[in-house]
Amino acid sequence: MKYLIKNGKVVDPSIGLNKELDILIEDGMITEISDSIEDNRADKVYDVKGCIVAPGFVDLHAHLREPGGERAETIETGAMSAMNGGFTHICAMPNTSPCMDNAAIISLVLDKAKTAGYAEVLPVGAVSKKREGKELASIGEMVQKGIVGVSDDGYPVATSDLVKKALEYCILFDIPLMEHAEDLTLTKKAVMNEGFYSTKLGLKGMPSIAEDIIVARDIIVNSYVKGWLHIQHLSTEYSLNLVREAKNRGERVTCEVTPHHLFLNDSYLDFFDTNYIMKPPLRSEKDRLALIEGIKDGTIDAIATDHAPHPNEHKNCEIDIAAFGIIGFETAIPVIFDLLYHKHGVSIERIIELMSINPAKIVKLEEGRIMEGKKADLTVVHPDKEVTVNPKYFKSKARNTPFKGLKLKGSPVLSVLRERVVECKVGD
Amino acid sequence: MKKFKHKHLLGIEPLSKEDITQILDTAKIFKGICKGTNKKFPALKGKLILNLFMENSTRTRSSFEIAEKRLGADTLNFSASASSLSKGESFYDTIKTLESMEPHIVVIRHSSPGSSRFLADNIDASVVNAGDGAHEHPTQALLDAYTIREALGTLEGLNIVIAGDIKHSRVVRSNIWLLKKMGNNVTLSGPPTLIPVDVDKLGVNVDYNFDNAIKDADAVMMLRIQRERMVESFFPSLQEFNMLYGLTRKRMKSLKEGAIVMHPGPINRGVEINSEVADSKRSVILEQVSNGIYVRMAVLFLLAGGQINEISN
């Protein structure tokens, strides 16, 4: 098959590209990029005038639920959902059942992803066996299979000792320790951010310091061992400042934030809707605004969805027993473009850095993906197209999203990975 | 008098000053009727009221039952231990089962904040929140208000102190909404571990020093202390709690003349309130219990669409 993607504005800040160009794709490879390519050279032509054509978006944080949680999502539906939302590469977190803590399960996940043939799945292995925080998992064996990082996902790395050893050991493979920063002693049975709204609603609060304490601990250890620490779903102003200071000292610390922590705050809990509960919890407006500053000043490296599908019955219940997390692949682009590009004036280039270039660097995809001779790996976004989010179009099995019915400016148009071209649709 | 504006009573927060006054005035009429020879006023004859109690409660449930019976309603008690809930049925499925019984009103007590709203969103009936976790307990605040208004002759411009376990109390949250809407000064007192963050943003004062807090009080509302809070290290011992925040005889003596002492019950003698105080003339604790019936009659009557002139005629 030959595809022609024409009239789009091709933007790849990693190679300083920002120009209206046509791209010809033959058998999954980019064969020509030029000012004008004739329609008759392709079997199918996509005229994407007004759209941005970027190197494929990379999501550093997703839960695909397979093996063990197939009622919520499978690797196939997750990878389809990702491409429908504009992502070509997604990191699969290890909190499956059994957990992704050995080479055999990593192989299983990669095989399933290959068979599915949608977005490329980049597995993240557990730090410790069974994520129990005791012994290191077989990190080296998992690296051989293709993991791009380690995380005890859903839990923080249990002890300072294990953080130290994991950071040290990962130096060998040059992969990040991806930390879920939550001091569990401060979040027992808690539902939402501790603050005015938890007080008003009578819900048990998770204080922001539960995150900050673990971030501080890890930064201290990381600066000592000179490893690579990556903070997942960073959500507080204080943690952001800790990361900023570490970066200023030249330490290797990277971080991601989610679209929902940028777009929402804890006041949305006011009606006890379980689609607003997740970990870390939606924080205060002050934290949210600080994160947007972190986007602008470059402290934040990446936007990651923390796509967390759940079956309906785990959300359609009392709020204090509901499952944490929301789906994110199919709402990320509308939410981010509406909020950052339209409301906060963040440049298209910076958004592409956050959603494609930087996360690609973290998982070691090669730079300059939009070049002749490279495999096709593109995300096409219409930055000005309004969309009313409608989960009926979602390819995810799950429907747990707080963005349903929201009118947002910015929409994914096409995801292209090798020979697979997905026409994205996430709303009307 | 107008029809009541709300379909449900999920909390005090959504109510206006007028709504609150309407409930209290209706309760006053019911009290008048019930003090007479005919204690029944069968305005809800033929209506089915379900009492869905998914957390232990004897007092609140009994009070609702009496109110329902005096209004002539058919009532059914559905308690968690006797139900299929212990067999793992979801709350949603329980609600749908109850809906098939076609109740007019469901009274719910549940340990989870927001559960009464969840019920209201999923059932075709009026819902009365009889306590949802630490969120709200609106009929308690209404009966407290009724009792204050009756004892002090007003429900405006008063200094009201609420003391003890503020953090875990639904009674406090409903009372704050109500007392502030009616124009009173509310001061909360308790150990800092039991004062939730940013509570002052609800428009109340916080004074950790209980002796200081009660100096100008017109009413002091004590809250029940649960022993498990001690195990969770919110404070070291019941004796120490009593020393710092118990309403003792000495503290009662420091109150202004005419100031009243309240408690939503059940009381822990010697912990948050000492016997001499609970049994004193200042205590209106038992009046709170009896007023609870009239206030709940008023709430059920108004939610069923009743109008006050039907009663007075």
Image (tube, rainbow, N blue to C red):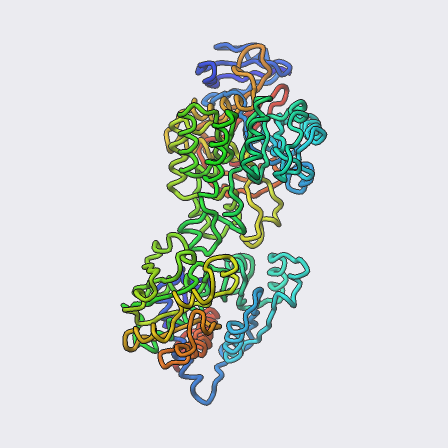
User: Can you tell which quarter of the image residue B279 is in?
Assistant: bottom left
User: Can you tell which quarter of the image residue A383 is in?
Assistant: top left
Question: How many callouts does the rendering have?
Answer: 0
Residue at 59% across / 67% down in the picture? Answer: B102
State whether residue B206 is above or below residue A122.
below
Measured from the top left, where is residue B166 in percent x and y?
Answer: 42, 61
State whether residue A122 is above or below residue B129.
above
Measured from the top left, where is residue B281 in percent x and y?
Answer: 36, 81
Task: Judge whether residue B25 can be spotted in this image.
Answer: no
Measured from the top left, where is residue A275 in percent x and y?
Answer: 52, 46
> Observer-nearest residue: B91 or A238?
A238
Task: Judge whether residue A284 can be spotted in this image.
Answer: yes
State whether residue B126 is above or below residue A239.
below
Q: Is residue B174 left or right of residue A145?
A: left
Measured from the top left, where is residue B248 in percent x and y?
Answer: 38, 73
Q: Is residue B124 left or right of residue B202?
A: right
Q: Quadrant of the N terminus of chain A?
A: top right
Residue at 42% across / 56% down in the picture? Answer: B193
> Observer-nearest residue: A417 or B164?
B164
User: Can you tell which quarter of the image residue B96 is in?
Assistant: bottom right
**Name of the residue lying farthest toward the bottom:** B37
Q: In this view, does A159 lie to the left or right of B88?
A: left
> Observer-nearest residue: B72 or A268?
A268
